[in-house]
Image (cartoon, grey):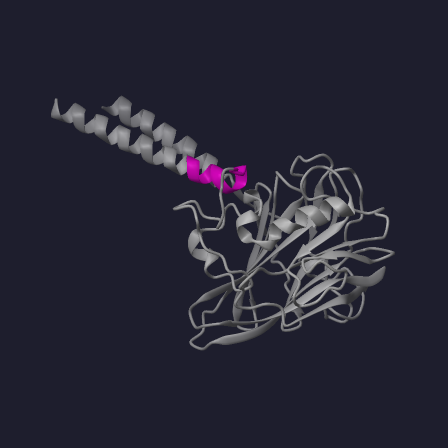
Amino acid sequence: MEKIITSITFLIFVVVSSSSALAVPAALPQSIAPGLGALNWEVTNTGGTSSGNAFSGVCDQTSGLTIQDATSADGSTDAYDNAHSIWVDGAIFDAPGSVDLTGNTILAGPVVMSGLNVSVEYAFSDVVQAGRVRVIFQNPTPVTINASVDMAVNSGASTFTIEATSSLDAVFGTDDYWVVTSDGGPNDPVNTSVLWGQLADVPPSSVATTVFGCGGDKGIAATFDISVPTNARRQLLFFTGVGDIVGLGNTVAGATVNAAMFNSYLDIDPSLMAGIPDAELLEVVNWFLRPVNAGGGGGCSLDHKTTSAWKAGDLWLLLALISSLGLWRVRRKIDQ
């Protein structure tokens, strides 16, 4: 019996060690290369502006979490000059000194902003040239808190061009779920910014194509007015794509065709939704999300399991099975 218990203990140690190694504290900047050609995402905490505002001043390397730049799978560089920074009541989300790094996912926070505990997650797919930006607001106070949230992307484009929108024109408005932009070449990666989804409780209250200056001041921004009840959580969910999104190319036509996946959350590539617990889907206010796979999470078919989203769950399942088998064998040994 002692030998059996020793073996089980060793296996448990291996499984727990592997699981705990998935999420590690890390310092910024971080460079995430998912393995799709030359695709690379550069995340820093230097996205602040001289004005302390998302819509004025210039980038000045002060604190603020941002996707500073990206390289598309075909090797095209300079996708952004600071993108997908989050601003709450006019203040940028400033990541703490250490973030959690799990595979291709970076989680920063919580940080107290306007009375809310705010966390920001950047999760990058290893299947498509895209990532998700998830902003989590938790209200620890006894009163409802209202906040104005800006999401800003400086395109880094010398010749900023709106190529397509979800409303099938080249005019970006509050009715557009997504927008495809380029530098007119494209010489840089084509950008796709996804802001919200059908039937959302909280669509954007305003959008803009002028943001803080960083070489130029053209880009994509949206403002959301959220309300977080006492002792509750609410979330905002965005997506960012470069190049053709699907595949390894970098064309306006490819990006426009593939951006249509964001017209319905059921069509979003599963790798972009993996790892979001079912219960948290209901907290997202700028999309109408519902789980469709019992126990699967992610709001859509999860045939693809990313390493970062699923490995820990699989290991803990193995742990449970090993423990159950070990206890059964021990009990049987005692009974004999």
- Residue 286 drawn in magenta: no
Where, quadrant-wise, is the N terminus in this rendering?
top left
- Looking at the picture, tell me which residue is in the foreground, 269 or 146: 269
- Number of marks drawn: 0
52 with respect to 232 (left or right): right
Q: Is residue 328 above or below residue 207?
A: above
Q: Is residue 16 above or below residue 222?
A: above
- Looking at the picture, tell me which residue is in the foreground, 334 or 323: 323
x and y, in percent, of residue 143 in the image: 45, 77
Q: Which region shows up in magenta?
A: 304-314
Where, quadrant-wise, is the C terminus in this rendering?
top left
Say which residue appears at 85% left-offset and 59% top-offset. Answer: 215
Q: Please indicate, yes or no, whether residue 42 appears anywhere in the rendered image.
A: no
Q: Quadrant of residue 171?
A: bottom right
x and y, in percent, of residue 112 in the image: 55, 67
301 with respect to 207 (left or right): left
